[in-house]
Image (tube, rainbow, N blue to C red):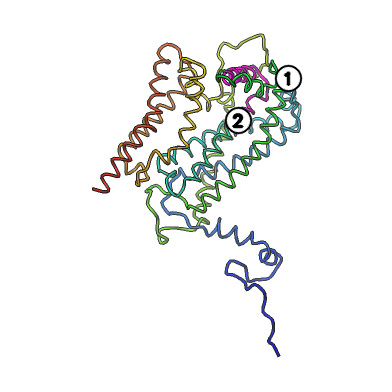
Amino acid sequence: MSGPSLPEHSPTPAQPASGGVLSWIDRRLPVISGFRKEYIDFLMPANLNALWNFGAILTAVLVLMLATGIFLAMNYTPTAGGAFASVEMIERQLPGGWMLRAMHMTGASLFMAALYIHLFRGLYYGSYKQPREILWLSGLGLLLMVMVTAFAGYVLPWGQMSYWGADVAGKAVGAVPGIGPTLEHIMEGSDTLGDIFIHRFFVLHFVMAFAIVAVVGLHVAALHVSGPNNPSGRPVPAKESVPFHPYYTTKDLTGLVLFALVFVALAFLWPDLLSEPENYRPANPMHTPADIEPEWYFLPFYGLLQSVPSKFGGLLAAAGSILILFVVPWLDRSPIRSARERPACRMGMAGLVIAFVMMGLVGRHHAEGGWMIAGRIAALYYFSYFLVLLPLCARREMRQLTA
């Protein structure tokens, strides 16, 4: 007589042994044990500093932007004749509408600020190096997606700056030799900026927001496969690691509280710091504002666009300033990761930040007079850092290590 039959699959250590509904679900779809493995027991280096808080901050703001954006979209009219009026209705008649829009606008600015800091951290500590290339590339893909989404959102209120910002962007795209006019027509939908353009950008803004969530999932998955970097840039042994919870959950919550204080102050106490007065006037194609400029987070690229004599050259420089980041893992082949241990790169990184800020100031002052010269110097240094300084430092450091 044969003995009692054994279960087809024996339980694994990751599956909860206790009974209950959650245990029953987890044995068939291990989401609970998987979450515990990846977000509670996941080992993290113990030496991470405050710059590692911005990943959690970005996640929290993204959720806030999606929640407020859905409610705003329910009351928005994507037409040239109704867009501005619907935004006014949201702010003046919809209960709590003014707060939703203030949170959405402030969230957009602070999301970009946190994203730039997150990107700087990756550059400074060499988080783009092997085996984290996919993590770096997916993060840059997110940067491009967020910039497109932010520009589309900037257009939707259809105020003066929205209209003329879209006009400048359309003319820049139209400057591409050969295919420029076709691209401009695809972007605008007709010979004039109107209903088709606003409808397309409304759909783009809405769809891209959820596409960003999907790519964030890919980005986090890449992080969990390659493991987190740390300020030293060296591999951290298990004895110098701590579980994500409670050590980094409490640290991230502390960072979120501090960030929330800044958020609330800007949204409700000093909203004019992040808004453009001209955009509180309805779009008027017959009246050009005295100073056309984008939101602050696009100013460095706007400065590059203006610093180059030709429109197409400026467009190439602005696009190249982002695209060059995609090849950084192959421009910098030094086995030393962190700029803490690379004095030349550390000084070069300080110059890179100064050049980026200078390009923003040039965009703010429309590259006139001395600002034109300053913009060209800043642009030259920006590209030289990636194309000249990083490869030379990497070559020197590799020679020193092999000597």
Q: Which residue matches tag 1?
A: 80
Q: Quadrant of residue 66?
A: top right
Residue at (53, 60) in percent of width and height: 41
Task: Return the x and y of residue 63 as percentages of the image width and height.
Answer: 63, 42
Highlighted magenta segment, given as a residue range: 147-174
Q: Are marks 2 and 1 in contact (CB under 8 Å)?
A: no
80 left or right, relative to 265? right
Position of the N terminus, as image quadrant, is: bottom right
Question: Is 169 covered by the magenta stretch?
Answer: yes
SS class, disc 1? loop
| Residue 290 in the image: above or below residue 11 | above
Residue at (30, 39) in percent of width and height: 343
Looking at this view, is 336 or 273 the one in front?
Answer: 336
* Classed neighbour count for the residue bearing mark 2: other residues with Cα under 10 Å, few (<14), some (14–19), many (≥20): many
Q: Which residue matches tag 2?
A: 150
Residue 117 circle label: none
| Residue 374 in the image: above or below residue 128 | above
Looking at this view, is 395 or 279 the one in front?
Answer: 395
**Main structural element of the magenta stretch: helix, strand or loop?**
helix
Task: Return the x and y of residue 109 as percentages of the image width and height.
Answer: 56, 31
Q: What's the CA distance linking mark 2 and mark 1?
A: 19 Å
SS class, disc 2? helix
Task: Return the x and y of residue 346 as percentages of the image width and height.
Answer: 34, 37
Residue at (51, 19) in percent of width and height: 312
Q: Tell me the amino acid under the disc marked 2.
A: Ala
First in sequence, mark 2 or 1: give its number.
1
Q: Tell me the amino acid under the disc marked 1.
A: Ala
Question: Is 89 covered by the magenta stretch?
Answer: no
Farthest-out residue, left: 403
79 left or right, relative to 320? right
Q: Quadrant of residue 59?
A: top right
| Residue 266 in the image: above or below residue 128 | above
